[in-house]
Amino acid sequence: MPVNLKRIIWNAQKTFKVDLRQTSDMHPPEIMGAVDKLQEHLWVVHGDDLLSIKAQRNSTFLFNIYLRSTFASKRVLGEYKHTREAFEWVIDEIESRFLQSLIAPGEMIACVAAQSI
């Protein structure tokens, strides 16, 4: 996966000093809306034609499943106990790290992969 979500969640809990014994100040519709908005911002293939839209959906399908399973509202409220501020930071961090993980076409990745075998 292009982003290590567990590490980002852990960093948010430590940075914002999330107390796991207290309840979160968020509501499920807020969490679902933020995850939906994040998925709309994760563009890999740009374009409005049918082929580009299908390529975009195919390229982010598994990552969207990973996002939805990790940030199910029950897990965010019950397991992670994020505050609103911490959750917003997590969403922004995921977006920035995802965009950093994209590479330009023609980049010499095969050489690096061949050397690491």
Image (spheres, helix red, strand yellow):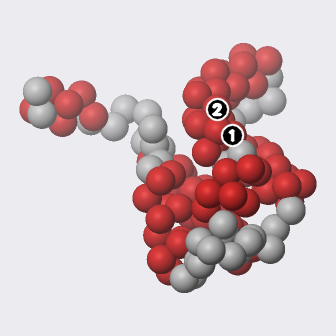
Residue 91: give x, y in percent of width and height: 65, 61
Residue beneath disc 2: 65
Between 49 and 10, the one lying in front of the other is 10
Disc number placed over residue 44 in the picture, else none: none
| Residue at 58% over, 28% down | 62
Label 1 is placed on what type of residue?
Arg
Mark 1 and mark 2: span between their CA atoms? 5 Å
Residue projecting furthest to the front? 21
Q: Secondary structure at mark 1?
A: helix
Instruction: Point out the image quarter for the N terminus.
Output: top left
Between 13 and 43, the one lying in front of the other is 13
| Residue at 59% over, 77% down | 18
Residue beneath disc 1: 68
Instruction: Point out the image quarter for the C terminus.
Output: top left
Between 83 and 53, the one lying in front of the other is 83
Residue 4: give x, y in percent of width and height: 44, 50
Q: Are marks 1 and 2 in contact (CB under 8 Å)?
A: yes
Vertical side of 18 occupied by 100: above or below: above
Residue 93: give x, y in percent of width and height: 56, 64
Label 2 is placed on what type of residue?
Ile
Vertical side of 16 occupied by 6: above or below: above
For this view, does 27 lie left or right of residue 47?
A: right
Residue 34: give x, y in percent of width and height: 79, 56
For this view, does 6 lie left or right of residue 71?
A: left
